[in-house]
Image (cartoon, helix red, strand yellow):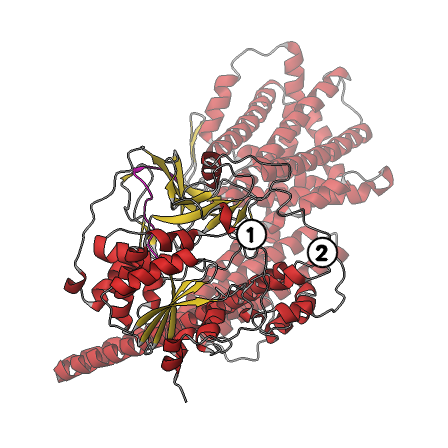
C-alpha cells in the first residue's frame, strides 16, 4: 500500500465534494504584465488594532518615508502597519472601512509628497539568520496571508506541531481574478526563494505547488523555477489540479491533494499540513532577504466598465476611487464596485476606501456581466444548495435558523465551517442570498462570544483583585504582628508598665466620655418625666427632684389664679417666690452634692449639668410676671357691665408692672444716672430691657394723665370754688380708672414693642428708656412742688382727703395705685431731678398756676395716704416674702 508521500510523488489527486463551474473571465486581465499606477495624493492606512494590542508610533504632523512603521506592539497577534509612500501624517481619524458595512475604523491619513522615498532597508543573507530572526523579520514586515484571509504569516511559520507537508496555493479559482497567475509568470524565481525560506523554517518532507489547469503558463513558469532551485531533489513538485470552484479553499485544496479532511473546528497544522499563498511566499522573500516591509501588492482591476483592465502593483492604503480613475472607469447607473471576485467578494457602499493587504481584486462589472439583484423568493426545498456545498453542510437548515435569528441552533449545524464560497447562493433557484444570512449569523455569534469572553476576563480580574487585596491584608497583619513582637521583645519592665498605664488612661477617658453623653441624655429626660426606673447617679436624682417640685408648685399656683381674682397679687408673688426658692433649692442641692467626697467622674459631670439646668430654670421664672399683662390688655376691652372686673384686672396689672419695675431696678443696680447719661454694665440682659421699657411706659402714662386732669379741672373752674365731695369722688374715681387702663395699655404696648424690636445687645435702648422715665417723673414732681408753694388751703386738703377716702372705699386697688404713683415719683434719682429742673426754668402763667394748684392738692393727698398705708403695705410684703 502506497503511503501519502508516495501518492504525492505520483501526483495522485482526490475528488472534493460539491463545487460549481462558473464561467471564467480571466482573459480580461491576465493578458498584460503587472503594471504601475500613478501615486495618489492621499493614502488611507487603517490601524484597527490600535488600542487592542498595539499603539501608534506616529502623530499628526510627522513626516514619514515609505516603509516607516506606523504602529508598534508586543502581542503575538500584532501585525505592524507601514507607510505606503513618503509624506506627512495629516490626520488620524475614523474613516469608512473597506467592508460591506463601511463602518468607520481608525485611519492614518498620509498626504504624499510625490517622491515615494523608501526608508533605509537592511539586507541579510539567509545563511546569516537564525530561525527566530527570520520569523521576527517576517513579523516586523507585517506580512499576512495574501490569498484573502490575511492571517498573520509569522504564526504559520512557527507552529507547535511537526509539519510534514507544505502546500503553495496557486489555484486562484475565482472567475475574474488573475493576480497570482501573473505573479507566478513574472516572479517565479522570487516565489521559489520564498518557498526556500519556508522550507528552512518548517523542514517539511514534501512541498507541493498546486495550480489549476486553466493557468498553463503559470504552471510552466513554476516548473522551470523548481528545476533551478536549490531545494533537495524530490522534496518539491508542481501539481496541476482540475479547474473547479472553490478548489482554492484551504480545506478543499488539502482534500484534493491529500484526500484528508480537516476536522470541524480544527486547523490544518494538526494534520501536519500548512498552506501558503504564492503571493505570501513572494512577500517573505522580500522581507527576509531585502528587508522590505509589505507596503504593496498585486491587485486585479477588471470588468467591462474598466478602460484599462489588468493587474497592478498598488500601495496598501491607495483609495479605490483613485485606482478606478487611473484605469479609466466609466460607471453605469446603479454601478456596483466589488472588492474580491464575483463569488466571495462584497460590494462597496463608498469607494473612498483603501486597498488592504487581503485585497486581490477590484471588479466593476457591466449590467450584462452581473445583473441587478433579483428579488428573494420562498425556499422550495429543492436541495441544490446542499449538493453544491463543498463543506458538506445543510445550507437550508442554516438559512432557516439564521433568518429566525436562532443563532445557537445555526451554530449546532456547524455554521462556523462555512467558507462563504457562495456556491449555495449561485445555484439557488429562489435567488435567496444565503451567504448574506450566514455572515450576519456569524457576526452575531462572534459578538456574543466576545461579550462572554470580556465578562469572563472581567471576572478573572475581579477575582485576582480580591486575592491580591487579601494577600496584602495578610501581609500587613503579619508585618504589624512582627513589629509588635519586636517592640515587646525590646521593651523593659518599666516600659511595659508605662504602656499599660497609658492604655488604661485612654480606656478611662473613653469610658468617661461615653458616660457623660449618656448622663446628659438621661438628665434631659428627667426634666420631662419625674420617674425613671433606671439607676442614675445620686447628684442627678437630687436635681430632678428639685426641678419636679418647682414645676408642681407652678402648676398649682396657675390653677389658683383662675379661681381667686381678689388675691391675684399675693398669689402671683407667692408663686414667683416659690419657684425662685425651689430653683435656689435645686442649685443648693446640686452644689452640696457636688461638694461631697469622693465623687466619681460621672457624678461630677452630672452635677455640673444639673446646676446649669437649675440656673436656666431660675432665669426663665423671671419672665413669668410679664405674662399676665396680655390678660390685662384683653380685660381692658370689656364692656361697662364688667367695670369692677376691669378695675381689679387693672390693679393686678399695676401690681405686676410695679414688681417688674422693682426687679428691673434690682437687676440694674449698678446703673448710675448722671447728667442724663447712664452707664450700662450689663447690656446683654434682654429681661432688663423689657422691664425698663415697662417702667418708662407707666411713668409717661401717669405724667400725661396728671396734666390732662389738671387741664380739665381748670376748665371747670375748680380753682375758685370747692367741688362737692360726691363730684370730686366721681372724678377721681373715673380718673384713676382711666389712669389704670391707660397704664395697662401702655405697658402691654411697650411689652409687645420690646418683644419685637429690642435686641439683647441694645444698650442704647436701656439708656433712652431710663432717661425718659426719669425726666417724666421729674416733671411731675416739679409741678407738684410748685403747686404746694402757691396754695396750702385746708379746705382743699380736706376735700382731697375726702376724695381719697372714698377712693379707698370704692377700691383698695385704686389706693394702691395712688401709693404706687407717689412712690415712683419719690424714687427719681437726684441727677435726673437736676436734669428736669434745668428743663423747667420758664416762669409759670396764670393757667399753669391753676394747674399747679390742683396737682399740688393731689400730691398732698397722695403723700398723706402713703404715710397711712405704709405699715399695711410693709406687713403685706413681709407676708408675701415669707410665703
Q: Is residue 876 left or right of residue 541?
A: right
Q: Is residue 155 left or right of residue 120?
A: right
Quick one: quadrant of the N terminus? bottom left
Membership of 85 in magenta stretch = yes
* Residue in view at x 69 percent, y 62 percent: 428
Disc ID at residue 561: 2
Q: CA distance from mark 1 to mark 2?
A: 106 Å
Magenta part of the chain: 78-91
User: In which quadrant of the rendered view does residue 49 lie?
Assistant: bottom left
Quick one: quadrant of the C terminus? bottom right
Membership of 107 in magenta stretch = no
Disc ID at residue 346: 1
SS for tag 2? Answer: helix
- Local packing at callout 2 (Cα closer than 10 Å; few below 14, some 14-19, many 20+) is some
* Residue in view at x 46 percent, y 29 percent: 830
* Residue in view at x 17 percent, y 57 percent: 124
User: In which quadrant of the rendered view does residue 780 lie?
Assistant: top right
Pick the front one: 29 or 551: 29
| Image spot of residue 879 (x, y percent) | 60, 57
Pick the front one: 806 or 507: 507
Q: Is residue 418 left or right of residue 182?
A: right
* Residue in view at x 51 percent, y 76 percent: 264
| Image spot of residue 791 (x, y percent) | 63, 20
Amino acid at each position: 500500500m502506497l503511503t501519502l508521500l508516495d501518492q504525492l510523488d505520483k501526483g495522485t489527486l482526490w475528488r472534493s465534494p460539491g463545487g460549481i463551474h462558473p464561467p471564467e473571465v480571466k482573459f480580461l486581465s491576465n493578458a498584460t504584465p503587472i503594471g504601475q499606477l500613478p501615486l495618489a495624493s492621499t493614502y488611507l492606512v487603517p490601524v484597527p488594532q490600535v488600542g487592542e494590542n498595539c499603539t501608534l508610533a506616529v502623530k499628526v504632523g510627522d513626516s514619514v518615508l515609505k516603509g516607516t512603521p506606523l504602529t508598534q506592539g508586543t502581542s503575538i497577534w500584532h501585525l505592524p502597519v507601514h507607510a505606503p509612500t513618503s509624506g506627512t501624517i495629516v490626520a488620524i481619524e475614523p474613516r469608512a472601512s473597506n467592508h460591506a458595512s463601511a463602518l468607520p475604523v481608525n485611519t492614518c491619513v498620509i498626504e504624499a509628497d510625490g517622491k515615494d522615498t523608501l526608508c533605509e532597508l537592511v539586507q541579510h543573507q539567509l545563511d546569516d539568520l537564525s530561525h527566530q530572526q527570520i520569523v521576527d523579520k517576517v513579523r516586523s514586515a507585517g506580512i499576512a496571508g495574501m490569498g484573502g484571509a490575511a492571517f498573520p504569516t509569522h504564526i504559520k511559520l512557527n507552529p507547535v506541531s511537526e509539519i510534514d507537508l507544505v502546500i503553495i496555493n496557486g489555484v486562484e479559482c475565482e472567475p475574474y481574478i488573475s493576480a497570482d497567475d501573473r505573479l507566478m509568470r513574472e516572479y517565479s524565481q522570487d516565489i521559489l526563494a520564498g518557498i526556500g525560506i519556508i522550507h528552512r523554517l518548517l523542514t517539511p518532507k514534501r512541498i507541493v505547488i498546486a495550480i489549476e489547469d486553466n493557468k498553463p503558463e503559470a504552471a510552466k513558469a513554476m516548473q522551470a523555477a523548481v528545476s533551478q532551485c536549490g531545494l533537495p531533489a524530490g522534496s518539491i513538485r508542481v501539481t496541476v489540479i482540475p479547474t473547479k470552484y472553490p478548489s482554492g479553499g484551504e480545506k478543499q485544496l488539502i482534500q484534493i491533494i491529500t484526500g484528508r479532511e480537516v476536522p470541524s473546528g480544527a486547523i490544518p497544522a494538526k494534520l501536519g499540513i500548512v498552506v501558503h499563498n504564492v503571493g505570501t511566499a513572494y512577500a517573505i522573500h522580500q522581507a527576509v532577504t531585502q528587508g522590505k516591509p509589505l507596503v504593496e501588492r498585486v491587485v486585479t482591476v477588471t470588468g467591462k466598465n474598466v478602460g484599462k483592465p489588468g493587474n497592478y502593483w498598488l500601495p496598501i492604503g491607495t483609495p479605490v476611487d483613485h485606482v478606478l480613475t487611473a484605469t479609466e472607469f466609466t460607471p453605469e447607473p446603479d454601478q456596483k464596485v466589488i472588492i474580491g471576485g464575483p463569488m466571495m467578494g462584497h460590494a462597496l457602499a463608498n469607494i473612498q476606501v483603501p486597498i488592504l493587504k487581503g485585497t486581490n481584486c477590484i471588479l466593476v462589472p457591466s449590467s450584462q456581466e452581473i445583473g441587478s439583484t433579483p428579488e428573494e423568493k420562498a425556499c422550495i426545498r429543492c436541495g441544490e444548495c446542499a449538493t453544491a456545498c463543498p463543506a458538506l453542510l445543510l445550507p437550508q437548515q442554516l438559512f432557516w435558523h439564521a433568518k429566525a435569528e436562532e443563532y445557537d441552533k445555526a451554530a449546532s449545524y456547524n455554521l462556523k465551517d462555512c467558507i462563504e464560497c457562495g456556491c449555495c447562493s449561485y445555484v439557488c433557484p429562489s435567488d435567496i442570498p444565503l451567504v448574506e444570512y450566514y455572515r450576519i449569523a456569524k457576526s452575531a455569534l462572534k459578538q456574543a462570544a466576545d461579550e462572554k469572553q470580556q465578562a469572563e476576563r472581567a471576572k478573572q480580574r475581579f477575582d485576582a483583585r480580591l486575592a491580591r487585596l487579601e494577600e496584602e491584608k495578610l501581609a500587613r497583619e503579619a508585618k504589624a504582628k512582627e513589629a509588635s513582637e519586636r517592640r515587646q521583645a525590646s521593651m523593659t519592665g518599666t516600659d511595659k508598665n508605662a504602656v499599660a498605664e497609658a492604655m488604661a488612661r485612654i480606656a478611662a477617658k473613653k469610658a468617661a466620655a461615653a458616660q457623660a453623653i449618656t448622663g446628659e441624655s438621661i438628665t434631659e429626660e428627667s426634666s420631662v418625666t419625674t420617674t425613671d426606673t433606671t439607676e442614675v447617679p445620686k447628684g442627678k436624682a437630687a436635681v430632678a427632684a428639685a426641678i419636679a417640685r418647682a414645676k408642681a408648685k407652678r402648676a398649682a399656683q396657675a390653677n389658683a389664679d383662675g379661681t381667686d381674682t381678689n388675691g391675684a397679687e399675693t398669689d402671683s408673688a407667692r408663686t414667683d417666690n416659690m419657684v425662685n426658692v425651689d430653683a435656689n433649692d435645686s442649685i443648693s442641692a446640686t452644689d452640696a452634692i457636688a461638694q461631697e467626697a469622693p465623687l466619681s467622674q460621672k457624678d461630677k459631670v452630672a452635677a455640673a449639668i444639673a446646676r446649669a439646668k437649675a440656673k436656666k430654670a431660675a432665669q426663665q421664672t423671671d419672665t413669668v410676671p410679664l405674662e399676665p399683662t396680655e390678660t390685662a390688655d384683653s380685660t381692658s376691652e370689656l364692656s361697662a357691665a364688667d367695670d369692677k372686673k376691669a378695675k381689679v384686672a387693672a390693679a393686678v396689672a399695676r401690681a405686676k408692672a410695679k414688681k417688674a419695675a422693682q426687679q428691673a431696678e434690682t437687676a440694674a443696680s449698678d446703673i448710675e444716672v448722671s447728667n442724663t447719661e447712664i452707664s450700662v454694665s450689663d447690656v446683654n440682659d434682654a429681661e432688663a430691657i423689657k422691664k425698663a421699657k415697662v417702667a418708662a411706659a407707666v411713668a409717661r402714662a401717669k405724667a400725661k394723665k396728671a396734666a390732662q386732669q389738671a387741664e380739665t379741672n381748670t376748665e371747670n373752674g375748680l380753682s375758685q370754688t370747692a367741688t362737692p365731695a360726691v363730684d370730686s369722688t366721681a372724678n377721681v374715681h373715673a380718673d384713676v380708672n382711666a389712669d389704670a387702663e391707660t397704664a395697662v395699655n401702655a405697658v402691654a404696648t411697650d411689652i409687645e414693642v420690646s418683644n419685637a424690636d429690642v435686641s439683647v445687645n441694645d444698650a442704647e435702648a436701656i439708656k433712652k428708656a431710663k432717661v425718659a422715665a426719669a425726666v417724666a417723673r421729674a416733671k411731675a414732681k416739679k409741678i407738684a412742688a410748685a403747686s404746694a408753694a402757691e396754695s396750702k388751703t385746708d379746705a382743699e386738703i380736706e376735700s382731697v382727703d375726702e376724695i381719697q377716702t372714698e377712693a379707698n372705699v370704692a377700691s383698695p386697688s385704686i389706693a394702691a395705685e395712688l401709693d404706687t404713683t407717689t412712690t415712683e415719683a419719690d424714687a427719681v434719682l437726684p441727677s435726673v431731678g437736676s436734669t428736669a429742673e434745668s428743663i423747667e426754668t420758664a416762669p409759670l402763667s396764670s393757667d399753669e398756676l391753676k394747674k399747679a394748684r390742683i396737682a399740688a392738692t393731689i400730691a398732698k393727698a397722695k403723700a398723706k395716704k402713703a404715710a397711712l398705708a405704709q405699715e399695711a403695705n410693709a406687713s403685706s410684703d413681709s407676708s408675701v416674702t415669707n410665703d
